[in-house]
Image (cartoon, grey):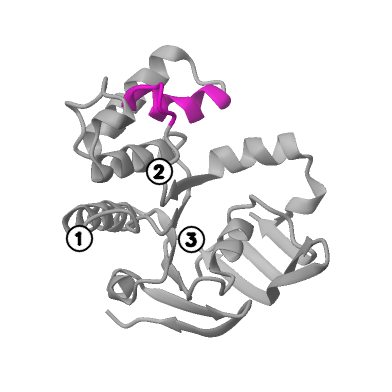
Amino acid sequence: MSKTIVELDNVTKTYDLGKVKVKALRGINLKVKQGEFLIIMGASGSGKSTCMNMIGCLDVPTSGRVLLDGINISTLSESKLALIRGRKIGFVFQQFNLIPSMTALENVELPMIFQGVDKKTRRERATKLLNQVGLGRRLEHKPNELSGGERQRVAIARALANNPSLILADEPTGNLDSKAGREVMKILTDLHKEGKTVVMVTHDPSLINYADRIVHIKDGIILKDNKRRK
């Protein structure tokens, strides 16, 4: 039986916006299993990005528990959580979130610096990862010298820097044309075939064929949680 990497146990999240309280999640129960490709679908405002923030341990719930490898993240200090999160989870965002002043190589090296990896090792690994995503000739290019698809591939290489077991992708094709989007999805699919767990948030129904499990969220609750037959 597959190991559970992250579990959301009756998770709620309410944002206090002064006079208004927004209930983003209303009692989510979800287990992310090792080796699966899970897509979380929902319209804008459905709670899917908040759900991904919980899975990625980027936020803590208003009530309920988020367990990362069986550990309740609310019991960890922020510094300890950041260290564990940086080692176990790789993030890919719609806006790429690359540092403009750094080269592709330096952007990929950055997560390894936070984990205390020595310069020679991180330079070799960053070079290998950029070659893996087809950017071996773009090592010294800065983000503004790269296309959108190339920037997203740098972001994927950066997400892999510390060899995490879980890759989280938030609308990774949202800012890309269809060709670049297919290239990014091929990389994520290949990573899944190699044994990585992939969780992707999207509102695009054309992407569901890449997943082996689809969770539909609306108004902060899970409507459907289906495994696909391939």
Residue 150 on the magenta span: no
For the view shown, which residue lies furthest in the front direction? 19
- Relative to residue 104, is residue 31 drawn left or right? right
Mark positioned earlier in the residue sequence (3 or 2): 3
> In the rendered image, which quarter is residue 100 located in?
top left
- Mark 3 / mark 1, whichever is N-terminal: 3
Above-or-below relation of 202 to 29? above
Residue 113 screen position, x and y as percent: 52, 22
User: Would you place residue 45 above or below residue 120 in this image?
Assistant: below
Q: Residues within 10 Å of mark 3 (few under 14, many from 20)?
A: some
Say which quarter of the image contains residue 139: top left
**Vertical relation: 25 (above or below) 126:** below
Q: What's the distance in space between the residues labelled 3 and 2, CA to CA?
A: 25 Å
Where does the magenta region start and end?
99-114
- Report the residue marked by disc 3: 34
Residue 96 numbered tag: 2
* Image quarter of the C terminus: bottom left
How far is disc 1 from disc 2 in space, using C-alphas? Answer: 17 Å
Q: Image point 79% across, 69% down: which residue?
A: 20
In the rendered image, the residue lying farthest to the bottom is 223
Q: What secondary structure is marked by label 3?
A: loop
Kind of residue at disc 3: Gln
**How crowded is the residue under tag 1: few (<14 C-alpha within 10 Å), some, or many (20+)?**
few
* Disc 2 residue type (three-letter): Phe
Is residue 110 in view from this perspective?
yes
Tell me whether circle 1 and circle 2 mark residues in contact (CB < 8 Å): no
Sequence-first tag of 1 and 2: 2
Name the residue at 30% across, 30% down.
144
Dominant secondary-structure state across the stretch colored magenta? helix
What residue would you read off at disc 1? 178
| SS under mark 2 | loop
